[in-house]
Amino acid sequence: MNRRAMRSNRFSIVLAVLLASLAYPAVNASGESICSQVTLHTFESSSGLPALLCVPDGSGPFPAIVDLQPRICEGYAALGPPWEQAELPARGYVLLEIDSFAARGLAPGKCEDLNVLGSRQVIGDAYAGLKFLAQDSRVDRRRVGVLGFLGGIATAAIFATTREARRTFLPDDSPAFRAAFAFYPYCNLEFTGASPNFDAPIRIFIGEKDDMEPANRCVELAQSLHAHGANMETIVYPGAEAGFDITPPDTNYPLPDRTSLHPGGMTVSTHPQYSPWGYNFAACTIRLKSIFDLVDPAEVAGCMRRGVHFQGNAASAEQARADLKDQMKLLMGE
């Protein structure tokens, strides 16, 4: 499963290139800086992988979250720090944020490349984060979860809780992920071999009108895997599109395009955001023998189309954050 095909990215490369030139401070709810750059040692090479570590006030031990955030792939929607960077440390969680694309120096245009970054690498990044956190005395190594956003990155967060992933990256006596949380993952999956075994509960948060990661496919995936013993549930937000949890700057750029499908005919906008160029795999089904399978581009050539939407939804965002808080309280041992 290549993290791209599972990620139907999307937002215009023009937007992402502009984002890539921006730097932003990491802050908590009070405005005080709590984050610092750290280096992870991944399983694919000895080279270091940069990440952002945010730690609450106090000595701990705190529960922690490995946050898989493909910020470089989100265009203008990603202006400013992600909401979880302030909210989770304020609630007493250590947060380790990893952008698997940006950390490798990949350009925003690579976000749509089927072969540039596979699920093995992204899941490996999650386990590098777990190993890093488990060695920090401020972290309760028994309560480390994984959180993923956007398409195949969020799907990789789900797969990180499988027995196959854990045995690949860590010894059996190493700490495991306590739970997984995924915002709009790509769920159009069919397992052609044995169903994967999940060792931790999983919660999916997705918009009803997401036209890149269809909500009904996530509901169906959860039901199918639940029948094989997985503790997986999907929360669907009525009327919400992809990126509903983000409130980007309300700015529109009047670049009318007759091929645009979004109301208003804007090709470059943030509220709503529409790109007529972005790859969309919503009509595809990816068949997997293993969670680490790559996707043959020829397999999706006939079902891939162009055109993607992204729209913040303040009401759904507030509800989703409340739901995440409740689920973390339930599943992370608070």
Image (cartoon, grey):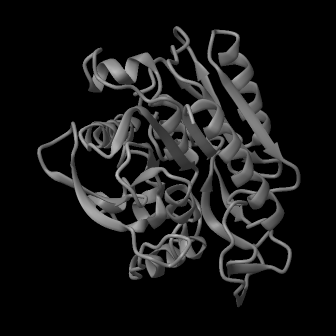
164 and 209: which is toward the camera: 164
Q: Nearer the viewer, residue 218 or 307?
A: 218
Q: Determine the image quadrant of residue 32.
A: bottom left
The location of residue 162, given as percent across then percent down, is 46, 21
Q: Can residue 64 be seen by looking at this rendering?
A: yes
Q: Is residue 17 left or right of residue 41?
A: right
Q: Position of residue 282 (x, y in %)?
A: 69, 44
Quarter of the image that includes the C terminus: top right
User: On the image, which quarter does residue 29 sit in?
Assistant: bottom right
Q: Nearer the viewer, residue 131 or 115?
A: 131
Left/right of residue 289 with respect to residue 202 in the rendered view: left
Relative to 197, residue 103 above or below: below
Q: Position of residue 18 (x, y in %)?
A: 46, 82
- Residue lying at the far bottom of the rendered structure: 254
Q: How many marks?
A: 0
Seen at 32% across and 43% down, the residue is 129
Residue 284 visible? The answer is: no
Q: Looking at this view, name the residue that lies furthest to the left.
A: 46
Which residue is drawn at the image coordinates 31% and 42% (left, top)? Answer: 133
Q: Residue at x 45, y 58 (%)?
A: 111
**Viewed as shown, does residue 328 lie left or right of 16?**
right
Residue drawn at x 67%, y 60% is: 243
Name the residue at the front extreme.
58
Query: In the figure, residue 268 lies in which quadrant?
Result: bottom right
